[in-house]
Amino acid sequence: MQRKVFQLLVDNTSGVLSRIAGLFSRRGYNIESITAGVTADPRYTRITIVTSGDDEILDQIEKQVFKLIDVRDIKVLEPGNSVYRELALIKIRVSADRRQEIIALAETDNFRAKIIDVCKEALIVELTGNQDKIDTFIGLLDGYEILELARTGLAGLGRGIENVTYLP
């Protein structure tokens, strides 16, 4: 099983995300993460999909997604030629006497996370980075109770200007 990151440019129309997700559902393909947002041109939406499968399945996914009427472009974002980021919000139960431990961990050069909310019994950490960085931070919270966790899913862009898609 391999993972692939697909970047789609689609028409910014209602139901487009549902049609793309429906294709995956009908074919029994798994979506590990999906993010969507309008581009600099409000007529188009950029969708990043992380999925997995063998080579044949991943090729089929690419071909079938590209056939959808709203899809204008599809690219595979290769790890070495792309930049990936994800946002995580992590609410941690922590007493006042142990709070500084979490703050110190969050503020290390490895994570550069922000404490965005503090209350008597918990705090919320905001962390941005690749999936491994977020997974590592969460792993280091062993011994603390994670009350809630929200992750945005992967967003990515190819490096350089060679593969920029210009739509009319």
Image (cartoon, rainbow, N blue to C red):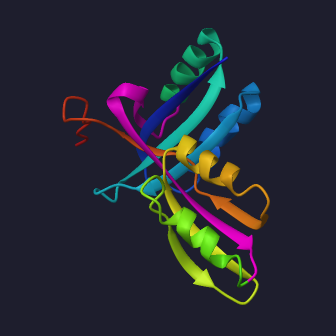
Is the C terminus in the top left, top right, bottom left or bottom right quadrant?
top left
Task: Name above or below for residue 91 compared with residue 52.
Answer: below
**With respect to residue 112, does 76 lie above or below?**
above
Q: Chief secondary structure of the magenta span? A: strand
- Residue shown at the point (67%, 37%) measured from the top left: 31
Which quarter shows the N terminus?
top right
Give the magenta part as a residue range: 68-95
Q: Quadrant of residue 90?
A: bottom right
Q: Looking at the image, is 119 positioned above or below residue 92?
A: below
Q: Position of residue 26 (x, y in %)?
A: 75, 31
Q: Quadrant of residue 56?
A: top right
Residue 18 left/right relative to 42:
right
152 or 166: nearer the viewer: 152
Residue 121 place in picture, x, y as percent:
76, 84
Position of residue 98 measured from the top left corner of the image (x, y, whole percent): 70, 76
- Taking the magenta stretch, the answer to whether it contains residue 77 is yes
- Residue at 56% of width from left, 41% of height from top? 132
Seen from the viewer's position, the closer of residues 63 and 124 is: 124
Viewer-side residue, 52 vs 121: 121
Residue at image location 72% in from the left, 70% down from the top: 92
